[in-house]
Image: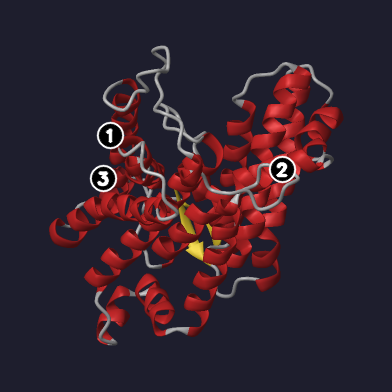
Amino acid sequence: MRIELEKRPGGSRLFSFVSPLLALLLTVVCGGVMFALLGKDPVSALYSFFIEPLQEVWSLHELAIKAGPLILIAVGLSVCYRSNNWNIGAEGQFTMGAIAGSFLPIVFYEWHSPLILPLMLVMGMLGGALYAGIPALLKAHFNTNEILTSLMLVYIAQLFLDWLSRGMWRDPQGYNFPQSRNFVPEAILPEVLSSGRAHWGFVFAIVAAVLVWFMMRFTLKGFQITVLGQSERAGRFAGFSSRGMIWFSMLFSGALAGLAGISEVSGSINHLQPSISPGYGFTAIIVAFLGRLNPLGIIASGLVLALTYLGGEAVQLSLEVSDKVTRVFQGLLLFFVLSCDTLIHYRIRLVFDRLKGASDGAA
């Protein structure tokens, strides 16, 4: 006996539309069961997780801070995934963008100029794009699986950041703490509003989502991404280069991840340290699929996943549970999104094979 997936002849557009909402509902139900098993009141726990972080102005600013990198990275990943290039290493590209963009304010600490912040943002994008270019090169010219190479490069980037923060970029006046000098005021991304800490990284994310939506819907490049993603053979017949698409999608995705990295460091942390991300690059994969790989849908899903970070912190403090609760919620959400999509577009069939011995005997 074996299990096969058979594509349904006509998928329901209604169920395809409500699939993310159904996945979110199933996640909430399973989360309630999880809290009950931990001996906590599920209603109060879910209230602390999803409602409490939205009641204060400062927490809304924190929501924007956490949503910005998720949206920015997920928008770039959506281009990769729709073109059938599976970039799993956005976390590493995020880190390398932060490192490259931090070069100026750390190495040239005495330089004070209005140009420093724009140059940091450009260098952050270049750092992320060049790091994403490694798996692009390996896939385009050596047919190497980009899932493995991009994922393994994440850990190299994280170790490189750790080495810099504890070594040559460590603040000589920082009492031996593993972090760099604090950025000068000209190198800090300004706040959007005076009522909180939300900075221009969130604005970058919204602008990027709108521009990519326009590209995908109204330009030849968007049509090329869609065609090659659905059928590489049809794309080649139309004159589109699959190798060129590998380079474009990976570099574009890496550039947005790098921009997210330097925006996070410049806007929220203001220095380099061994850990600058709670897993934004991996969580952004969930954001991309929850948003149906649509840049406008990614804005909403990015806010939802950012809420899980804030809610996880609130639950951890109020109910004294592990900080891994956030990861469990995010993992459940990805599981149910993929499961709902699979069951909507495919049906499960049980296939019973004849025993080999019986067939040989009949012969």
Query: In the structure shown, which secondary structural element does the residue marked by tag 2 occupy?
Result: loop
Mark nearer the N terminus (1 vs 2): 1
x 51%, y 41%: residue: 185
CA separation, marks 1 and 2? Answer: 35 Å
Q: Give the foreground label among 3 and 2.
A: 2
**Residue named by callout 1:** 156
Q: Earlier in the sequence, mark 1 or mark 3?
A: 3
Disc number lying in front (1 or 3): 1
State how far apart marks 1 and 3 are (Cα): 11 Å
Instruction: For marks 3 and 2, give the CA distance.
Output: 39 Å
The residue indicated by pointer 2 is 196
Asked whether the residues under the numbered discs 1 and 2 touch, taking CB atoms below 8 Å apart as contact, a structural biologist would say no
> Which residue is nearer to you in this view: 331 or 352?
331
Callout 3 amino acid: Thr
The single residue placed furthest to the left in the displayed view is 142
Instruction: Determine contact: label 1, label 3, CB under 8 Å.
Output: no
Residue flagged by tag 2: what amino acid is it? Answer: Gly
